[in-house]
């Protein structure tokens, strides 16, 4: 365990020395499923410090806890113990309203299988988070149209989501994740269902949006070539988060 945690500890110290603000801090995070003999720690004791503007890939075999980890960061799930701090505030201490705001406004989440409403138009899908947050309908439609333009789907707003191709649906899902202006983009195998060409295009798009909108992004992926293009590659295995590679920060200058 010690040699697994040491690179992360070193990374944390190195990061503390940089000037970028810490956006996210994960401390001693544990997630255990089952009880008694069936008890299994999906996340053992995970620590991580994420600076504003970083793009991080989390790799690991299927079942290693990547989705569980991202759900905990998004406050879509609660840890068994440990804490996630966003801008120095522990998510676990937030009341219902600020917690809902965190999920809806501070974080954008992209799922592997997009989770769009197939019978609604692309524009309606993207407008939904704005309406859920109490935005006016005209404001929501305007924001949705703008975001569909940003993801390269300017002419497709009136098309039903279910009629779009896999790559287009994932672009709509990215627009929907970003429409409320989050600081943190979490993506759970966002290219997992796409062919190589679409994977590349969707990743290019995410990287471009990451830079132009000054996002902090964490994505789970099986695709090592795409992971290589992130600032850091972390691997999850046997419940431990380990630093695999760290690329020069200059690569991600905004
Ligand atoms: P990954 O995304 O890396 O494939 P997951 O986070 O989905 O991994 O799952 C990690 C492990 O936790 C798997 O073994 C999975 O079966 C288990 N798991 C996930 N959710 C639950 C749950 N609600 N109850 C019990 N076990 C779960
Ligand atoms: Mg998963």
Image (spheres, helix red, strand yellow):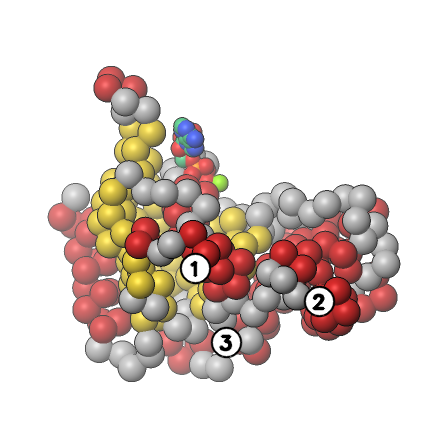
Q: Check residue 214 in the rendering and tell me which mark sits there, or answer none.
A: 3
**Of the residues under marks 1 and 2, which one precedes in the sequence?**
1
- Viewport quadrant of the N terminus: top left
Q: Does 157 appear above or below 21?
A: above
Image coordinates for residue 82, horizontal then vertical, percent: 24, 48
Work out how far the residue at label 3 is from the one at label 2, CA to CA, in angstroms.
26 Å
Between residue 129 and residue 111, name the one nearer to us: 129
Contact between marks 1 and 3 (CB within 8 A): the answer is no
**Of the residues under marks 3 and 2, which one precedes in the sequence?**
2
Q: Within 10 Å of the Cα at label 3, are there few (<14), some (14-19), or many (20+) other Cα atoms? A: some
Image coordinates for residue 151, horizontal then vertical, percent: 70, 67
Q: Residue at x 83, y 61 (%)?
A: 156
Image coordinates for residue 25, horizontal then vertical, percent: 30, 61
State left or right for residue 173 relative to residue 184.
right
Q: Does 254 appear above or below 220?
A: below
* Cβ at disc 2 under 8 Å from ligand 2: no
Q: Check residue 185 in the rendering and tell me which mark sits there, or answer none.
A: none
Between residue 1 and residue 151, name the one nearer to us: 151
Disc 3 versus disc 2: nearer the observer: 2
Query: Farthest residue toward the left?
Result: 2
Contact between marks 3 and 2 (CB within 8 A): the answer is no
**Disc 1 on helix, strand or loop?**
helix
Q: Check residue 136 in the rendering and tell me which mark sits there, or answer none.
A: 2
Q: Residue at x 31, y 54 (%)?
A: 93
State left or right for residue 170 relative to residue 36.
right
Disc 1 versus disc 3: nearer the observer: 1
Q: Residue at x 48, y 55 (%)?
A: 100
**Of the residues under marks 1 and 3, which one precedes in the sequence?**
1
Q: Is residue 176 shown to the viewer in this render? A: no
Ligand 1 location (quadrant): top left
Image coordinates for residue 81, horizontal then vertical, percent: 25, 42
Q: Which residue is mark 1?
A: 98
């Amino acid at each position: 365990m010690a040699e697994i945690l040491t690179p992360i500890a070193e990374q944390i110290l190195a990061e503390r020395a940089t000037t970028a603000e810490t956006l996210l801090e994960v401390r001693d995070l544990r997630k255990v499923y089952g009880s008694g003999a069936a008890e299994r720690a999906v996340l053992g004791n995970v620590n991580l410090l994420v600076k504003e503007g970083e793009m991080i890939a989390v790799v690991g075999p299927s079942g290693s806890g990547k989705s569980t980890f991202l759900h905990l960061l998004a406050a879509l799930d609660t840890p068994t113990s440990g804490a996630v701090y966003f801008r120095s505030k522990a998510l676990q201490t937030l009341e219902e309203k600020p917690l809902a705001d965190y999920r809806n406004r501070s974080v954008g989440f992209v799922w592997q299988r997009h989770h769009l409403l197939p019978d609604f138009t692309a524009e309606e899908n993207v407008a939904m988070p704005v309406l859920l947050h109490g935005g006016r309908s005209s404001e929501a439609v305007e924001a949705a149209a703008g975001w569909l333009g940003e993801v390269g789907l300017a002419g497709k707003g009136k098309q039903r989501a279910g009629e779009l191709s896999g790559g287009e649906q994932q672009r709509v899902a990215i627009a929907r994740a970003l429409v409320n202006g989050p600081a943190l983009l979490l993506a759970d195998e966002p290219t997992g269902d796409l062919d190589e060409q679409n994977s590349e295009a969707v990743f290019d798009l995410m990287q471009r949006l990451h830079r132009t909108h000054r996002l902090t992004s964490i994505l789970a992926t099986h695709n090592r070539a795409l992971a290589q293009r992130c600032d850091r590659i972390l691997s999850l295995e046997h419940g431990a988060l380990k630093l695999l590679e760290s690329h020069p920060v200059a690569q991600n200058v905004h």
